[in-house]
Image: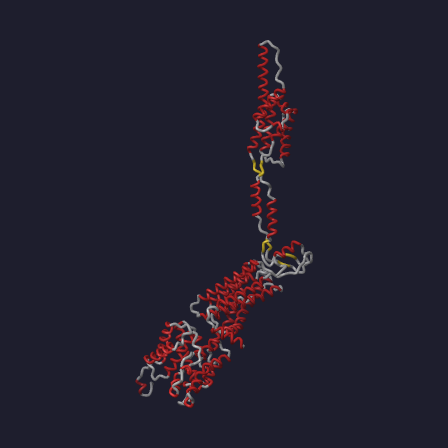
């Protein structure tokens, strides 16, 4: 408790700009460690070719790059070589064959013409008939023509014997052979002819010749010419083949190990492939890939940056409040992470669907009560985003989305439902309603995910969600006092409790110092009106006024409002003794409140409501006796007001006492008193440590005058009053 008090006092007083960044850095480090601990893959002590002791599932969806590469290689290998069909090749081969037959016919015709001329010349000259052109001569002439006019050496495929056979054919047979050969060649070259199938094509073409009607003794030469003429008409294209293989590899769907996929069954032998997959999933060690660490770091950095800028955008908050809000928000988020760790642990011991028991409404409920609705929306988003990664370990991606969506909806429901949080009963009722809303959310989400409606696995999460909704608010009610104590936070419900007239300390003031009690009520009315006027915390001001003079209960008669029958005990004391008693009521009050575990803001009001002002009456009285007395000896120890609310109480306290002691206060007198006290405080620099502005001071001035005029207005004098009263 001692250390808690020191921590609370230090933190609440701190208004340095560096505090928020320091808080957020600590928040980042702690959250990073916790999240990485939760999402770190579970490690298994397994060895090759041993029996698996338990079924191991993949904790995440990950690409198996080795398998993907193997599939891409296989797909590329399965692509056949690409050949490009060249129609010119068929035309060229047909032209070659026709040229061959044309040359044969030409040689035969030329020989016949020469023989006829020679015969006629011999007959005319009455000489013996010359010999006919020999076959060798024809062959030589044919070879000469072929070598001169044909681009390729046709003799490589058609030998002299074959050419001789052609030369021996008559014109009719030669035409018939040509017709059959060119026809078969055309059929053969219209199809795909490659090196690997060329033999089959030639065989088929020769079979066609065999079945033809040409003389049998000519079929051999026809087959030979045809075999020679048939060549590949498709050319291998390395570029197109490479492109198609690349395309086939690119079209391979990456091989993935899916989240929740069984890697090895219990009792199965761990072979090299299983071991490789376990290593790929980092299940053989406790290390995450660096990119995952970087990803979580960037995520938290983004969330922390959002929180920093969002906090600094709250113009209505002073620096101290911004620090306080950042610390409370960070603490609640860390608490949520710890609860997520517990749920993850329960998931690890095979309690199915336990994630729906997570108290998703806890964070938004706490933040809305302690801070405001805007921060509650932010904590809801933070929690939902975080849960998506935390619950990915043992669930499928679909369940990740379901749980994250449930947490988001539950948090939003708690913000909407929680309206009245001044009473615990109202908070519990809101928890019950959120529990019912949670049931509806989970029911709908499971329906959308196509879960079996009539199974126990469907309804158990629905029940968990209801318990989580109620549990969030029960847990929140229990935790709020801890936040109030540690961070000096004041909730509306706590202030309402302290404002209850039946509170023991208020009863103590009323019984021991009734004048002080009445004075406190009057100051509360004045200060509350002023706080409302400038947009301050009016409930805090009112409750603080109730207790600001609690220190007077130790010596009630020494304060003028409690003195009866004109008896003043200060008449028997020296000014110094009276000073000590008067000044002590601030420190005594703070001590009493501290002993009764009051929130720090209320304690600060008791301690600071006089600032370092001068106890003027006893100062001047001492000055009469001893001119060497200094003001410093008769000032309150302070500290000076550090918030607008305490500054308002400082002014209202003095104004109420001064106006109460004034005979027949009029508007003019009230205004003069208010102006005098405010000017005195300003000249005394009592408000230099708080963020109240000149404009707000003017509003306070006007509000005090208006309120006091309403309290002390002169009543109309009725005629009956002069005669002893109205009927």
Q: Position of residue 173 (x, y in %)?
A: 61, 23
Residue farthest along the right direction in this orientation: 50
Residue farthest along the front direction in this orientation: 628
Dividing the picture into quadrants, the one containing residue 676 is bottom left
Q: Position of residue 231 (x, y in %)?
A: 60, 33
Residue 459 visible? The answer is no
- At x 63%, y 18%, the residue is 134
Q: Quadrant of the N terminus?
A: bottom right
- At x 51%, y 78%, the residue is 597
Q: Position of residue 159 (x, y in %)?
A: 64, 26
Decide: is 255 above or below 110. below
Residue 502 visible? The answer is yes
Q: Quadrant of the C terminus?
A: bottom left
Report the number of numbered marks.
0
Figure colour scheme: secondary structure
Q: Is residue 466 left or right of residue 501?
A: right
Dividing the picture into quadrants, the one containing residue 715 is bottom left
Decide: is 513 above or below 1. below
Task: Say which of 77 and 355 sits in front.
Answer: 77
Q: Is residue 323 left or right of residue 66?
A: left
Decide: is 174 above or below 255. above
Q: Position of residue 563 (x, y in %)?
A: 41, 87
Residue farthest along the left direction in this orientation: 719
Task: Say which of 170 and 113 sits in front.
Answer: 113
């Amino acid at each position: 408790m001692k250390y808690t008090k020191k921590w609370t006092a230090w933190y609440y007083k701190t208004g340095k700009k560096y505090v928020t960044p320091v808080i957020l850095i600590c928040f980042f480090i702690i959250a990073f460690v916790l999240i990485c601990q939760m999402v770190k893959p579970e490690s298994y002590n397994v060895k090759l070719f041993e029996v698996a002791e338990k079924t191991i599932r993949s904790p995440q969806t990950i690409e198996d790059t080795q398998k993907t590469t193997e599939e891409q290689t296989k797909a590329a290998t399965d692509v056949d070589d690409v050949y490009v069909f060249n129609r010119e090749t068929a035309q060229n081969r047909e032209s070659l064959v026709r040229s061959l037959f044309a040359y044969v016919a030409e040689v035969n015709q030329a020989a016949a013409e020469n023989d006829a001329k020679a015969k006629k010349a011999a007959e005319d000259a009455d000489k013996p008939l010359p010999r006919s052109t020999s076959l060798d001569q024809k062959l030589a002439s044919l070879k000469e023509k072929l070598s001169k006019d044909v681009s390729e050496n046709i003799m490589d495929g058609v030998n002299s014997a074959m050419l001789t056979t052609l030369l021996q054919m008559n014109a009719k047979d030669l035409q018939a052979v040509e017709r059959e050969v060119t026809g078969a060649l055309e059929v053969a070259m219209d199809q795909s002819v490659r090196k690997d199938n060329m033999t089959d094509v030639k065989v088929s073409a020769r079979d066609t010749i065999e079945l033809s009607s040409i003389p049998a003794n000519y079929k051999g030469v026809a087959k030979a010419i045809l075999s020679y003429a048939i060549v590949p008409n498709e050319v291998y294209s390395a570029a197109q083949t490479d492109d198609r293989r690349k395309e086939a590899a690119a079209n391979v769907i990456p091989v993935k190990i899916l989240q929740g996929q069984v890697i090895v069954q219990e009792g199965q032998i761990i072979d090299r492939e299983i071991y490789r997959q376990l290593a790929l999933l980092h299940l053989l060690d406790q290390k995450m890939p660096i990119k995952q660490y970087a990803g979580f770091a960037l995520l938290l950095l983004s969330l922390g940056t959002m929180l920093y800028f969002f906090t600094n955008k709250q113009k209505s908050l002073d620096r101290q409040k911004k620090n306080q809000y950042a610390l409370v928000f960070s603490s609640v988020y860390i608490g949520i992470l710890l609860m997520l760790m517990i749920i993850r642990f329960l998931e690890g011991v095979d309690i199915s669907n336990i994630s729906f028991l997570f108290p998703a409404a806890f964070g938004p409920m706490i933040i809305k009560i302690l801070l405001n609705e805007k921060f509650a929306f932010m904590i809801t988003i933070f929690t939902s985003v975080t849960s998506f990664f935390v619950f990915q370990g043992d669930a499928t991606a679909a369940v990740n989305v379901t749980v994250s969506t449930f947490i988001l909806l539950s948090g939003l429901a708690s913000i909407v439902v929680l309206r009245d949080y001044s009473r615990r009963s109202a908070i519990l009722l809101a928890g019950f309603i959120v529990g019912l809303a949670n049931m509806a959310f989970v029911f709908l989400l499971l329906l959308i995910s196509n879960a079996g409606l009539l199974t126990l696995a469907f309804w158990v999460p629905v029940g968990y969600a209801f318990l989580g909704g109620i549990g969030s608010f029960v847990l929140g009610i229990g935790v709020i006092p801890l936040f109030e104590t540690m961070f000096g936070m004041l909730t509306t419900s706590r202030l309402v409790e302290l404002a209850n007239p039946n509170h023991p300390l208020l009863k103590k003031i009323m019984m021991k110092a009734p004048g002080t009690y009445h004075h406190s009520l009057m100051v509360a009315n004045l200060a509350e009106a002023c706080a409302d006027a400038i947009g301050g915390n009016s409930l805090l001001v009112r409750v603080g006024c109730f207790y600001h003079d609690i220190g007077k209960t130790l010596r009630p008669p020494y304060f003028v409002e409690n003195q009866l029958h004109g008896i003043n005990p200060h008449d028997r004391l020296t000014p110094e003794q009276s000073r000590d008693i008067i000044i002590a009521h601030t420190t005594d009050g703070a001590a009493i409140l501290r002993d009764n575990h009051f929130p720090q803001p209320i304690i600060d009001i008791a301690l600071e409501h006089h600032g370092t002002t001068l106890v003027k009456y006893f100062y001047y009285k001492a000055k009469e006796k001893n001119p060497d007395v200094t003001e410093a000896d008769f000032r309150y120890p302070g500290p000076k007001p550090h918030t607008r609310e305490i500054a308002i109480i400082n002014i209202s306290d003095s104004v109420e006492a001064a106006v109460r002691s004034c005979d027949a206060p009029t508007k003019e007198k009230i205004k003069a008193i208010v102006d005098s006290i405010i000017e005195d405080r300003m000249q005394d620099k009592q408000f230099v440590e708080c963020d109240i502005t000149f404009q707000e001071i003017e509003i306070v001035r006007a509000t005090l005058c208006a309120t006091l005029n309403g309290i002390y207005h002169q009543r109309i004098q009725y005629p009956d009053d002069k005669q002893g009263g109205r009927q």
